[in-house]
Amino acid sequence: MKNTEQIWDLIDAKREDFLALSDRVWGTPEICYTEFKSVAEHTAMLKAQGFKMTEDYCGIPTAVMGEAGEGGPVIAILGEYDALPGLSQEAGVAEHRPLPGNGHGHGCGHNMLGSAALLAATALKDWLAATGKPGRVRYYGCPAEEGGAAKGFMVRAGAFKDVDIAITWHPAAMTKVDEALSLANTRMDFTFTGRASHAAAAPHLGRSALDAVELMNVGVNYLREHVPADSRIHYALIDSGGVAPNVVQAKATVRYAVRSRDVANMVSLNERVRKVAQGAAMMTETQVEIRVISAVSNLLGNTPLEQAMYQNLQRLGGVPFDDADRDFAAKIQATLSEEDIDSSYARAGVKRDGDKPLCDFVVPLEVRGEPMIGSTDVGDVSWVVPTVQARVATHAIGTPGHSWQITAQGKSGSAHKGLIYAAKAMAGTAVDALADPALIERSKADLAQRTARHPYASPIPANVQPPIVQRPAA
Ligand SMILES: [Zn+2]
């Protein structure tokens, strides 16, 4: 247990600096490849802690990588710091009160995610220096998890080529080792081009792109009955062609997200959705152009690393919330429905036990919840490097993902305690791997077995680049 206590002490020694980092990033919510202030905060912290840094990592202006240590295995700790549109919210209040500004908010808790990951990496760096052990730790500051698939592009650029294991976490309602259930996901734009004309005087001369979009959506809605039950298809109108009903719309774009349990299923479903689009184009005598925006793979679990991380969670016990934390979480719960609260338990696979506002226990490793049917770009990392994630309680049980309630709790006592706990869980798992090379070998064998039938291929087409935004002039 000596290693465990040593690494926890190293985390506690720097806790205030990293809680402040998380709170600052909460205060500058930035979305999808525009995280310039957030990456500057993380870069400044890497510098202050003495990491060797690579800025504009993989050609992405809002990505950064810091490394420390010599020789030995390479441990990657993955952080994020992107926010979400529309989830602006005042901190510490249990009623919906957006802040003035651009409307963005940390409604997925990535301010905590990034700060805890960087704290874990810093403590590991300090541990390597104190013990003189061989080993390298890398902090990957990853932007655009929400809809930007940055890690997928980073994997494709070779960022994880020489990494031995990867560790990360996500803020949550319940504390547990992540079950590694997520869907492969492709985002595609279908742009139809027809011919404009006067909708009353010469409708026969027009070819409506908007009709094509509508027919495509109808076709996909029929397709839905004949796809695997765990697939998901949804769409948003990006361009309906204009606001004038007396013009036949010559151009219209619909964006689709197509999700399946794994990449192979997603690729075949993508093909079927494309056929529907081509059918709609044929019916309306329009042309369709299909553009992939981004794509992510499903998550792969890793049994040896999950066991190692679970031992760390057990050693830590539950997150040590206090009465003030429980009090605020109960106020947040009053804004939720019973169904929200029940679904938190169902997702974690835990029987509801009274009216606990916060999860102060660790969900056993063998407990399986209802699958989380979202997607994450950690998926692509998990196909090329043995990867493990913790979910750590930072907010009230029942808080929906991507909600103003997560933003409201993002600087609270529960957020801070969860952040420190997550850093300890990640750093503890990393120390176990550095102390036991056999664990790393077993985790690699596990990954090799999981990918034997379908080796990794990036789901992002070769000609698709990340939609980066250039750094604004200072
Ligand atoms: Zn998230």
Image (tube, helix red, strand yellow):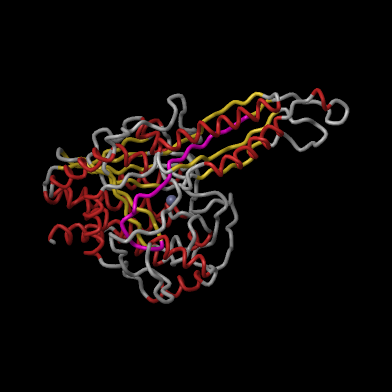
Residue drawn where x is 26% and y is 38% of the image: 52
Is residue 177 rendered magenta in the image? yes
Which is nearer the eye, 202 or 18? 202
- For this orientation, the residue located farthest to the front is 226
Which is nearer the eye, 360 or 447? 447
Q: Position of residue 240 (x, y in %)?
A: 69, 37
Q: Quadrant of the N terminus?
A: bottom left
Is residue 80 rendered magenta in the image? no
Q: Tally the marks.
A: 0
Q: Position of residue 127 (x, y in %)?
A: 17, 51
Residue drawn where x is 80% and y is 26% of the image: 197
Which is nearer the eye, 227 or 41? 227
Region in magenta:
173-191
The answer to which quarter of the image holds residue 277 is top right
**Residue 292 shown left or right of residue 426 in the figure:** right
Q: Position of residue 39 (x, y in %)?
A: 41, 43
Residue 284 makes an appearance in the image = yes
Residue 469 makes an appearance in the image = no
Q: Position of residue 139 (x, y in %)?
A: 30, 44
**Residue 42 shown left or right of residue 305 in the figure:** right
| Residue 430 to residue 291: above or below | below
**Residue 448 shown left or right of residue 242 in the figure:** left
